[in-house]
Image: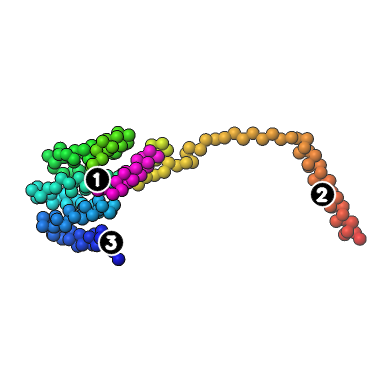
């Protein structure tokens, strides 16, 4: 049986096809979908961008709480550029409002890898992530990846793909010193030669008989 999120995803997917995606009457459905994403630790960027676009076209319908949830969900998908996309669709006036201002500040700390400052600020504003299931775990995974990238020189391309540092380039040459006992080597060779001679003589004797 499909979960409530999967059912809503299917319904919203149909709603977003065609001109209906710009119908403000659909905002109530889309806003409930955003809340469901927050509760069930799910994510749908296309639907969330559609909500922000409708807020742009219909400023009177703007909801601070829903916009905050969208921004926080976008942060859970770092290092992808979702957070920047969402931020660019929010009017500057609303960006100055609480709690959107604090969320944008947290996002800036994460994007600039000021992780210690991020966790300290989040601890002082824990009410921001109330109802956002899995937020800290998702962000923690991102911060761990960034730390490994910094430590080992990994790089990230424009598509968000991370390239592991070529280990062959970091291999350091190592001198291996081996001591050889020439006397023991000589004795080994003498012993081997003696065996060969004995075998050859034995074979010759058998042939002559």
Q: Earlier in the sequence, mark 1 or mark 2?
A: 1
Image check: 35 left or right of 147? left
| The furthest residue to the bottom | 1
| The furthest residue to the left | 60
Residue 121's tag is: none
Residue 189 appears anywhere in the view: yes
Q: State the residue position of label 2.
A: 196
Magenta segment includes 142: yes
Tell me, yes or no, whether the two marked residues, 1 and 3, touch with CB atoms within 8 Å: no
Tell me, yes or no, whether the two marked residues, 2 and 3, touch with CB atoms within 8 Å: no
Residue 20, position as x, y percentages in the image: 13, 59
Residue 38, position as x, y percentages in the image: 25, 51
Residue 76, position as x, y percentages in the image: 29, 46
Magenta range is: 131-149
**Discs 1/2, front:** 1
Q: State the residue position of label 1.
A: 130
Decide whether the magenta segment is chiefly helix, strand or loop: helix
| The furthest residue to the right | 209
């Amino acid at each position: 049986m499909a979960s409530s999120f999967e059912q809503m995803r299917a319904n919203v997917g149909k709603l977003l096809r065609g001109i209906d995606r710009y119908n403000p009457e659909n905002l109530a459905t889309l806003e409930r979908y955003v809340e469901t994403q927050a509760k069930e630790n799910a994510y749908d960027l296309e639907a969330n961008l559609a909500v922000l676009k409708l807020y742009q076209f219909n400023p009177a319908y703007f909801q601070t709480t829903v916009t905050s949830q969208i921004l926080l969900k976008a942060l859970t998908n770092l290092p992808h550029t979702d957070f920047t996309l969402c931020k660019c669709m929010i009017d500057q006036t609303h960006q100055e409002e609480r709690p959107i201002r604090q969320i944008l500040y947290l996002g800036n700390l994460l994007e600039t890898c000021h992780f210690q400052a991020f966790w300290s600020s989040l601890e002082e504003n824990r009410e921001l992530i109330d109802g956002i299931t899995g937020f800290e775990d998702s962000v923690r995974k991102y911060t761990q990846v960034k730390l490994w990238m910094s430590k080992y020189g990994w790089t990230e391309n424009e598509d968000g793909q991370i390239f592991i540092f070529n280990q062959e380039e970091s291999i350091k040459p190592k001198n291996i010193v081996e001591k050889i006992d020439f006397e023991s080597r000589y004795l080994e060779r003498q012993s081997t030669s003696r065996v060969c001679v004995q075998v050859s003589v034995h074979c010759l004797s058998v042939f002559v008989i």
